[in-house]
Image (tube, rainbow, N blue to C red):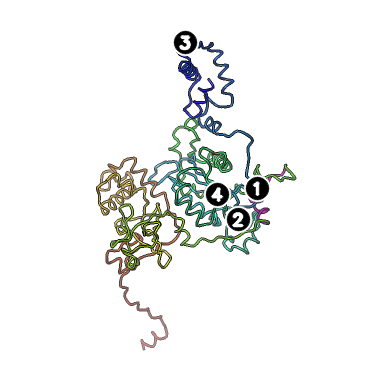
């Protein structure tokens, strides 16, 4: 029976009857059929109760796996004495339904980062599906002050908080209109084995910012217990108070949750940002004064105490820094430009680099290209000869009315596997147009007939995912647009403007002389 209980640790939850049957099977395999007589059913239940005590053998599978993977011996903990010395990051589905574009209800993923020394939740990002670029955006938000939003109470401003506002303002002018959330530069980030965090893009982002990347062992959630507990606090202190709360299991979900007045993704993100500022002023049980254990500190108070000894160095990210945090791929620069996932990008600035070698021998002389999964309108090529970035626009950008991400593009490619680049661009534009028009035109040319549930979900998630780079794109000149070069959808070609003739100023005395 001990062997049967051990085998059930990583499997699905079964009843005690199955464990009794499994015990009999093990006995027959070792001693032969009928060689060992099993005791009574009551005795088996008493034996199972003793052998499975504290193991959740017939209970929750998640708890059982966690207990089985826990190491023996006393627990240890690495202490952090300065803000940013040790930070933890994780992602989990948020137990709230949101209203995406076209009214499609769906759950979103929450990715957050916590500072162990101060228990500060430095940033949190909501996305329909988490990608590696979202973890990089979280790094950018961690080292950037949180601005005050319209409608927020003045009590949430940094100038009204326990943070040393005046002293920090002399060092970083960006904090003048910031909310009461500290800006912390990470030194070490602990993550799990999720593909989002161990991706090449996130490792490159940590390397660019000089951050020590430290993944935990497989199935070792206790090694980043602070962020695990923090995400649980988001569920109990924030998510359950929202309309559309689903509960963290199916048995806790109510009826017709999707029919409630749901928040949009952007509205929910703003609510979460405001709640984080409130969290920073809430006393935390893990922040107690060693000399006076009865006194609890808030994350902001703990940060104010530690920054006196650790100091503060602002990190201002430029437009090029945001491009550095985007995912990278390596491509050849051909005569027609650069092709990524059947999309062609080109610009006149590529003329000296066409069909040339980059000089990076480790990458077979290919060129490094950074792209945004949430915006396929442009990519950036690193100029390995002169340094800097070259912005390339998608050649078929004039066919779509709004920028979109790779989710809609990949979905259309799977639907039309043999289509050309022009046909795929038209198909994506038609998908977004039909999803935007809604069911009102059900009988007309713009009918949504044939728009499947999967199509609606893809279109809604596409429109709910803003670009990751908060920088304005470079607009190609009008002469290149006329030659067929793609331009952003919101850009109109320049026209010849007529000469402006100013209107004369009315002078009553001069008009009176003319009459005479």
User: Which numbered disc flags the more N-terminal residue, 3 or 4?
Assistant: 3
Q: Which mark is residue 287?
A: none
Q: Secondary structure at mark 3?
A: loop
Which residue shows up at 51% across the image and 37% down it? 219
Residue designated by label 3: 34
User: Which numbered disc flags the more N-terminal residue, 3 or 2?
Assistant: 3
Magenta stretch: give its range: 294-308
Q: Is residue 388 left or right of residue 54?
A: left
**Helix, strand or loop for the magenta stretch, by majority:** helix
Does 231 appear above or below 490? above
Which residue shows up at 56% across the image and 51% down it? 188
Q: Secondary structure at mark 2?
A: loop
Mark-to-mark CA distance, 1 and 2: 16 Å
Mark 4 neighbour class, 10 Å CA radius: few under 14, some 14 to 19, many 20 or more: many
Which residue shows up at 49% across the image and 62% down it? 318
User: Which numbered disc flags the more N-terminal residue, 2 or 4?
Assistant: 2
């Amino acid at each position: 029976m001990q062997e049967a209980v051990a085998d059930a640790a990583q499997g699905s939850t079964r009843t005690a009857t199955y464990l009794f049957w499994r015990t009999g099977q093990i006995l027959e395999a070792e001693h032969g059929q009928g060689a060992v007589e099993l005791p009574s059913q009551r005795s088996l239940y008493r034996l199972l109760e003793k052998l499975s005590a504290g193991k959740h053998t017939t209970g929750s599978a998640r708890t059982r796996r966690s207990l089985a993977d826990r190491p023996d011996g006393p627990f240890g903990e690495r202490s952090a004495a300065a803000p940013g010395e040790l930070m933890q990051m994780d992602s989990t589905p948020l137990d709230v339904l949101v209203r995406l574009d076209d009214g499609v209800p769906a759950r979103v993923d929450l990715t957050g980062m916590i500072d162990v020394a101060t228990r500060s939740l430095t940033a949190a990002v909501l996305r329909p599906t988490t990608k590696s670029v979202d973890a990089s955006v979280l790094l950018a938000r961690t080292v950037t002050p949180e601005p005050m939003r319209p409608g927020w109470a003045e009590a949430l401003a940094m100038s009204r908080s326990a943070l040393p506002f005046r002293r920090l303002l002399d060092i970083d002018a960006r904090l003048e209109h910031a909310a009461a959330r500290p800006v912390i530069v990470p030194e070490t980030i602990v993550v799990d084995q999720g593909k989002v965090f161990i991706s090449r893009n996130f490792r490159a982002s940590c390397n660019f910012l000089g951050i020590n990347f430290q993944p935990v062992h497989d199935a070792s959630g206790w090694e980043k217990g602070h962020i695990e507990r923090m995400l649980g606090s988001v569920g109990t202190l924030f998510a359950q108070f929202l309309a559309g709360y689903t509960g963290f299991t199916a048995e806790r979900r109510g009826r017709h949750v999707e029919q409630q007045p749901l928040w949009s993704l952007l509205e929910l993100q703003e609510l979460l940002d405001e709640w984080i500022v409130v969290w920073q002023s809430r006393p935390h049980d893990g922040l107690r004064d060693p000399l006076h254990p009865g006194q609890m500190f808030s994350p902001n108070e703990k940060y104010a105490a530690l920054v006196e000894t650790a100091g503060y160095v602002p990190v201002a990210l430029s437009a090029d820094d945001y491009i550095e945090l985007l995912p990278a791929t390596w491509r050849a620069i051909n005569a027609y430009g650069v092709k990524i996932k059947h999309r062609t990008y080109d610009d006149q600035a590529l003329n000296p680099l066409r069909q040339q070698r980059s000089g990076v021998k480790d990458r077979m002389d290919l060129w490094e290209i950074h792209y945004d999964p949430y915006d396929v309108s442009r990519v950036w090529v690193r100029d390995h000869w002169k340094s800097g970035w070259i912005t390339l626009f998608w050649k078929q950008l004039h066919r779509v009315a709004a920028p979109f991400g790779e989710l809609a593009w990949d979905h259309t490619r799977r639907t039309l596997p043999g289509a050309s680049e022009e046909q795929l661009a038209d198909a994506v534009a038609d998908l977004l147009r039909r999803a935007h028009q809604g069911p009102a035109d059900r009988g007309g040319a713009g009918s949504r007939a044939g728009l499947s549930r999967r199509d609606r979900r893809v279109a809604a998630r596409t429109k709910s995912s803003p670009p990751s780079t908060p920088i304005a794109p470079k607009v190609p000149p009008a002469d290149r647009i006329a030659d067929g070069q793609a331009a952003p959808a919101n850009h109109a070609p320049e026209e010849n403007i007529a000469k402006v003739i100013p209107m004369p100023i009315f002078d009553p005395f001069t008009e009176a002389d003319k009459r005479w």
